[in-house]
Image: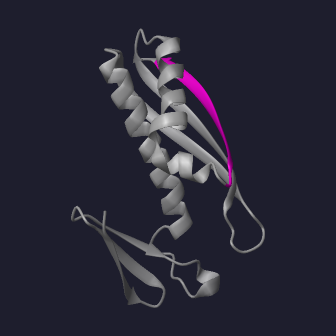
Amino acid sequence: MKARVQLLEGMTFVAESGSGHAVVFDAAPDVGGRDLGPRPMELVLMGTGGCSAIDVVHILRKARQDITGCTVELDSERAPEDPKVFTRIHMRFVVTGRSLSPAHVERAVKLSKEKYCSASIMLARTAEITTEIEIRES
């Protein structure tokens, strides 16, 4: 996997993935940023939610569950001192579908957290990661 990060101006950067996609990120205004994009650690948190969401949807579809939506809401805390690593991450999965099996949804979230999501497994080395599940009928 490869990526490239390039300074645009001030403290605003563009990151390009090896697969050809780009995202702009910026530093906080108190260190010279202009609030033109998410902070790098916000991208880490968003990527972790995305990694888990992809796992959960993929697992549920393989289990032939009629899933119509999946949202992951993340809440985190970071260490007060540098390096300000994540110390706590709570992931709330809101899974929508028709006649979803709660056991299947719980299994999918557990498999993502413990086996498949490399982002959350990596972050679990410094952060306590907790999950919560809400199933909605669509």
In the image, residue 105 sits, relative to residue 28, either above or below, namely above
Q: Is residue 116 visible?
A: yes
Q: Residue at x 69, y 68 (%)?
A: 84
In the image, residue 69 sits, relative to residue 84, either above or below, namely above
In percent of width and height, residue 110 lies at 54, 28
In the image, residue 91 sits, relative to residue 78, either above or below, namely above
Q: Residue at x 39, y 86 (%)?
A: 7
Give yes or no for residue 134 being in the magenta stretch: yes
Q: Residue furthest right?
A: 80
Q: Depth check: give the residue in front, 53 or 70.
A: 53
Region in magenta: 126-136
Q: Along the horizontal axis of the image, is 90 left or right of 50?
A: right
Q: Is residue 36 visible?
A: no
In the image, residue 38 sits, relative to residue 48, either above or below, namely below
In percent of width and height, residue 73 lies at 55, 42
Residue 16, image quadrant: bottom left
Q: Residue furthest left?
A: 20
User: What's the magenta bit mostly, secondary-structure-wise?
Assistant: strand
